Image (cartoon, rainbow, N blue to C red):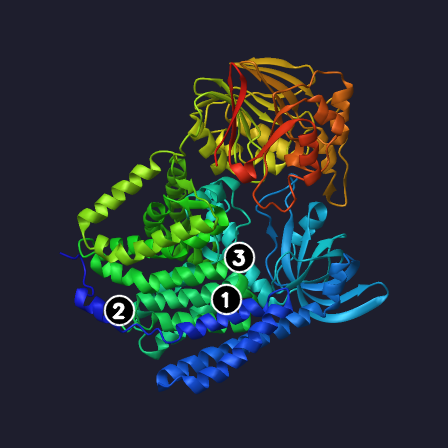
């Protein structure tokens, strides 16, 4: 028996047959017009516009049925209008003096108003994080000219400039000297403005802006005494404020498919409105007054979360999802609401047509509208709340998985389970968080109590994410090429079509659930990987470096950890590494150390060997603190240092000298930090490996002049194969195998073509993680044997 009432199979069938899909082609035309009109080149868009005009005339003449004719006319007309408006706005950008000077990378002064909260970058390339903020430029001065404009830029800064930028409240008008640069993708921002001086406040934000900031600050203050993970997650759940989130929580959420909880999404608004409308009904509000309550809730939500495109998108999609799961579900109007939302949003901001976030929002909402309620009704053998906790994330994941795989190259196998388990805690945490934000400016002690309750609901979500991420098969690598995406797309379509049949049977559902449990309980299996006699492995960790040296059965020396703990943990699990007698951090740049959570605190570690240059100082201090907390000694590397670590014979050969790092105007001399990388020769059962970190030509030449024998069977190419290499250093290593650790389609052009030519001339067989995945070198009586994962 069903625990609570709901639509039966007949009602479900009727709902399906009455879905209003008439506006879907119109919404598709609007989306296509926005996509074409915001293309960097205007010629393809002009061709599309001309084709649409011709198509409009043809459709008007040829289509006979009145309804079909009206839909066709509306589709063609929408394409023409949206494409035309998008072309106009794109041309306005191209004609802007900001765009012209950005192309010339001019140094100018700008007066700008902050429109989005300053945010720290997710990763730091050289240890210090970059702060970015969306801003609207009012005045630009340079080269003896001044212009009044009203266009968007992304202001960014690091060091002291970044810290000053981070203090600016939304609505503040400031002046600063900046270096302009072109943006790397189409969008409302005309240019990137890198700060060359601290921003000086010209006009303070309005009272309304300060009131909103007071509420947001009050929320952060109310949870300030909670544990680190809780005080970072509650503001993220409520208003998308991720400023206090830890890297560890961010990574576990990404691995387990919970990242959407920490961004402003339709789910936030849906939860807020559901709570407000339920509370309003309890106190007797009825009829049109309920609409007023809902409208007020939307206004408050947008004000607290800022009027950024992502917030407007989330608001629209949240309203659509709420309607689909609520009163309009039975009428079949959800698809129509979604289509209207798409049309309105691309008219407001045509660059959403090229946004991955927009595509994910639309697809997730479409999945929920099309299948969630129907599946919930089919699961009559479960209570309604439990059924909904399963069907909503399942429908959203199946609808979005091809896009997620295309951008990440992964499938979150555990995502469905973690979303279903976290669901009961997300609602209370979000609603209590909103209550805390409101109470914080009225009765702070009460706000601290509700914040404490919200924090412990958030803690349950963190525990679920940590448990899911710890499973060996939490996320599976999947090829993001055309064939791989076709296969995963076909699988998702099959899942959507067969979902009702499977979910209506408890036994089939339990069978599928058991299969999922079996998948996440073991690491992803790649035929032939890992090879049985591996000695050194360059793990595929994206744009970063992590090398594993076999030290014995289940033991390994890990040299650098890459930027992503999940990627390194997956590699170590596949290799069967259970103990790390020595962890080496060649230097303190994020692409070499940010994945350390996969080792420190997760596996037994005997020693941490680090660069003798503790720069950036804050990063070095943080790592020392983590090691001390785990009871692991930290030792500075020095030339001539010899260590025997299990089966690994280790000799440190660099840095020969420790350069001085100069910090000025908020920038760090990263070349000096690169040249302070730990460079070493390791020998495992006769196989010699030269490990190089990011050492640059200056440091390479010093090592060559030291007279050490650099000949090695395996060379980890310095600095991900960048173009900055010393030919004498590469030739001194002799012929053999060269391992390049770089991220697929990375922004730095690694590895450089001239470096690949140099390696070939030196007699090196070069393999790359960006093309072949993790790379393994083993040994036989006949010499080293190379095995690649892909």
Q: In whole angstroms, how far apart are the C-alphas of marks 2 and 3?
A: 42 Å
Q: Residue at x 58, y 67 (%)?
A: 208
Name which quarter of the figure residue 3 lies in.
bottom left
Front label number (2 vs 1): 2
Element at badge 3?
Answer: helix
Pointer 2 or 3: first along the chain: 2
Q: Which residue is mark 2?
A: 16
Identify the residue position indicated by label 1 in the image. Answer: 312
Task: Name the residue beneath numbered marker 3.
Answer: 216
Q: Give the residue furthest to the right.
A: 144
Q: Nearer the viewer, mark 2 or mark 3?
A: 2
Q: Quadrant of the N terminus?
A: bottom left
Tell me if I can see residue 339 in this picture: yes
Helix, strand or loop at label 1? It is: helix
Q: Earlier along the polypeptide chain: callout 3 or callout 1?
A: 3
Residue 322 location in percent, x, y? Answer: 36, 66
Residue 622 versus residue 123 in the image, above or below = above
């Amino acid at each position: 028996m069903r625990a609570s009432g709901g639509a039966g199979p007949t009602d479900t069938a009727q709902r399906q047959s009455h879905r209003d899909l008439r506006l879907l082609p119109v919404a598709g035309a609007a989306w296509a017009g926005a996509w074409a009109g915001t293309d960097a080149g205007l010629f393809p868009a002009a061709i599309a516009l001309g084709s649409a005009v011709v198509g409009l005339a043809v459709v008007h003449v040829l289509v006979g049925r009145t309804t079909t004719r009206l839909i066709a006319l509306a589709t063609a007309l929408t394409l023409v209008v949206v494409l035309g408006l998008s072309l106009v706005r794109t041309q306005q950008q191209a004609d802007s003096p900001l765009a012209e000077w950005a192309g010339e990378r001019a140094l100018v002064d700008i007066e700008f108003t902050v429109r989005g909260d300053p945010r720290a970058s997710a990763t730091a390339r050289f240890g210090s994080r970059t702060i970015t903020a969306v801003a609207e430029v009012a005045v630009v001065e340079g080269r003896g000219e001044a212009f009044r404009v009203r266009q968007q830029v992304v202001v960014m800064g690091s060091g002291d400039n970044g810290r000053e930028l981070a203090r600016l409240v939304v609505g503040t008008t400031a002046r600063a000297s900046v270096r302009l640069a072109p943006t790397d993708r189409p969008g409302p921002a005309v240019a990137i403005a890198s700060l060359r001086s601290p921003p000086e406040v010209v006009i303070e934000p309005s009272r309304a802006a300060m009131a909103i900031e007071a509420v947001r600050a009050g929320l952060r203050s109310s949870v300030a005494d909670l544990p680190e993970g809780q005080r970072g997650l509650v503001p993220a759940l409520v208003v998308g404020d991720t400023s206090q989130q830890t890297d560890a929580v961010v990574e576990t959420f990404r691995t387990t498919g919970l990242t959407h909880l920490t961004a402003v999404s339709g789910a936030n608004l849906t939860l807020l409105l559901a709570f407000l409308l339920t509370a309003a009904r309890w106190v007797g509000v009825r009829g049109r007054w309920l609409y007023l309550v809902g409208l007020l809730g939307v206004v408050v939500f947008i004000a607290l979360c800022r009027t950024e495109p992502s917030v407007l998108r989330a608001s629209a999609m949240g309203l659509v999802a709420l309607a689909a799961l609520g009163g309009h579900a039975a009428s079949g109007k959800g698809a129509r609401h979604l289509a209207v939302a798409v049309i309105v949003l691309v008219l407001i901001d045509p660059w959403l047509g090229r946004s991955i976030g927009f595509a994910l929002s639309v697809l997730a909402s479409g999945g929920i509208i099309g299948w969630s309620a129907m599946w919930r009704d089919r699961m009559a053998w479960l209570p309604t709340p439990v059924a909904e906790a399963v069907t909503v994330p399942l429908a959203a994941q199946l609808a979005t998985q091809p896009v997620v795989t295309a951008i990440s190259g992964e499938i979150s196998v555990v995502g469905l389970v973690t979303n279903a388990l976290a669901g009961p805690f997300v609602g209370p945490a979000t609603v209590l968080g909103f209550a805390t934000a409101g109470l914080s400016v009225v009765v702070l002690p009460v706000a601290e109590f509700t914040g404490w309750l919200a924090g412990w609901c958030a803690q349950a979500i963190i525990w679920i994410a940590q448990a899911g991420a710890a499973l060996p098969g939490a996320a599976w690598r999947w090829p993001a090429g055309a064939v791989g995406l076709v296969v995963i797309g076909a699988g998702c379509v099959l899942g959507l079509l067969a979902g009702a049949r499977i979910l209506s049977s408890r036994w089939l559902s339990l069978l599928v659930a058991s299969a999922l449990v079996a998948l996440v309980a073991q690491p992803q299996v790649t035929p032939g990987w890992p090879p049985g006699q591996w000695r050194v492995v360059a793990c595929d960790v994206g744009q970063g470096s992590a090398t594993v040296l076999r030290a014995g059965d289940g033991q390994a020396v890990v040299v650098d950890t890459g930027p992503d703990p999940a990627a390194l943990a997956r590699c170590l699990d596949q290799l069967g590494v259970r103990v790390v007698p020595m962890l080496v951090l060649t230097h303190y740049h994020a692409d070499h150390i940010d994945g350390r959570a996969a080792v420190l605190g997760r596996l037994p570690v005997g020693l941490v060997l680090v660069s003798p240059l503790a720069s950036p100082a804050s990063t070095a201090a943080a790592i020392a603190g983590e090691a001390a907390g785990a009871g692991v000694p930290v030792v500075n590397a020095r030339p001539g240092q010899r260590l025997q670590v299990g089966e690994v014979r280790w000799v440190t050969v660099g840095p020969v000298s420790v350069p001085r790092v100069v910090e000025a105007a908020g920038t760090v001399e990263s070349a000096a930090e690169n040249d302070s990388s730990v460079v070493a020769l390791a020998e495992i059962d006769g196989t010699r490996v030269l490990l190089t970190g990011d050492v640059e030509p200056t440091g390479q030449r010093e090592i060559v002049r030291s007279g050490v024998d650099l000949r090695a069977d395996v060379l980890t190419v310095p600095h991900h194969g960048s173009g900055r290499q010393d030919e004498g250093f590469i030739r001194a290593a002799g012929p053999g195998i060269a391992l390049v650790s770089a991220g697929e389609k990375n922004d730095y052009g690694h590895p450089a073509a001239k470096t690949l030519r140099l390696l070939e001339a030196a007699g090196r067989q070069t393999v790359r993680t960006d093309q072949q995945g993790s790379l393994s070198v083993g040994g036989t009586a006949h010499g080293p044997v190379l095995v690649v994962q892909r």
